[in-house]
Image (cartoon, helix red, strand yellow):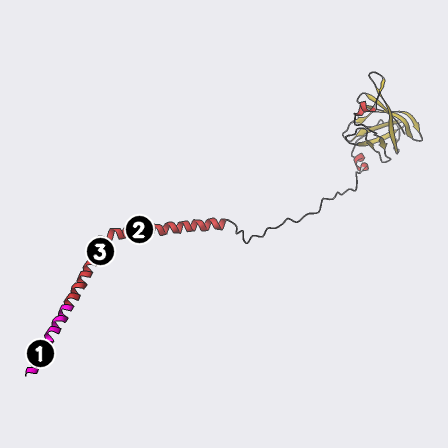
Amino acid sequence: MAHRYAGGNSKKPVAIIVAVAVAVLAAAVVAILFVLNSGKSDNKGETTRAATSVAQTIAETTVAGTQSNSDDSAKPDQSVIETEQPQSLPEAQSTQSGYDESSAAQSIVVPTKGTGEIGYFNATYIPYKAVDKDTNSEVSLREVFGTSYSQGVLTFNSDGSFTDSMYASEAESGAYVVEGEDISATYSNDKNMQITVNEWENGSPKDFVVNYGGYDVYFAA
């Protein structure tokens, strides 16, 4: 009997401890739930503001990323662009091997006198003196054609063209015709050449005079 009594008394403290532990645990759970609920109630506004701020930040980041992608797409990717070097083109080649005096002469209208059959000749003439028409005195060819004058000539061709290289700047060209013993000549700028033939020989002039701006210049073959 004594043994049973001892066994019955040892179970009571255990039961009490278990009950207290359960109570403490329940109180702790209740306290935790209360704290959590209380925290949610107090921080509701801050949580909402924080969420809004986070949402704005996410939105701004998204917009910035979109603009950045748009700008990047507008620019070519320099890493993949291959620069095309322009191919060298052949230099332009002239369709003419030289100055076509015949074609130039055909495009110039030379006034004719209608006094005889039209003819041409082929010869080159060198000036040998110049006379000032106002004073009737002889002057140097450099006074007429400039200080850079060296040696110009007049050349008449059998195709009806002529070239005048008396001025050092550039040679002039034109067209001419022979009518009887008269020569009519016109430059490519439509200016007429005033020619007076002094002597003929074998169908071409041997000696003639050309007026250059108030000076009579004498030519001979």
Segment tinted magenta in the rendering: 1-21
Between 158 and 214, which is closer to the camera in this rendering? 214
As drawn, the label of residue 39 is 3
The image quadrant that residue 120 belongs to is: top right
Badge 2 or badge 3: first in the primary sequence: 3
Mark 2 lies on residue: 52
Tag 1: amino acid: Gly
Tag 3: amino acid: Gly
The answer to whether one can see residue 114 in this image is no
Q: Position of residue 197 (x, y in %)?
A: 89, 25
Q: Disc 2 on helix, strand or loop?
A: helix
Between 129 and 207, which is closer to the camera in this rendering? 129
Badge 1 or badge 3: first in the primary sequence: 1
Badge 2 or badge 1: first in the primary sequence: 1
Q: Is residue 10 left or right of residue 49?
A: left
**Where 139 sits versus 63, above or below?**
above
Quadrant of the rendering where the N terminus is positioned: bottom left
Mark 1 lies on residue: 8
Tag 2: amino acid: Thr
Residue at image position (13%, 71%) is 17
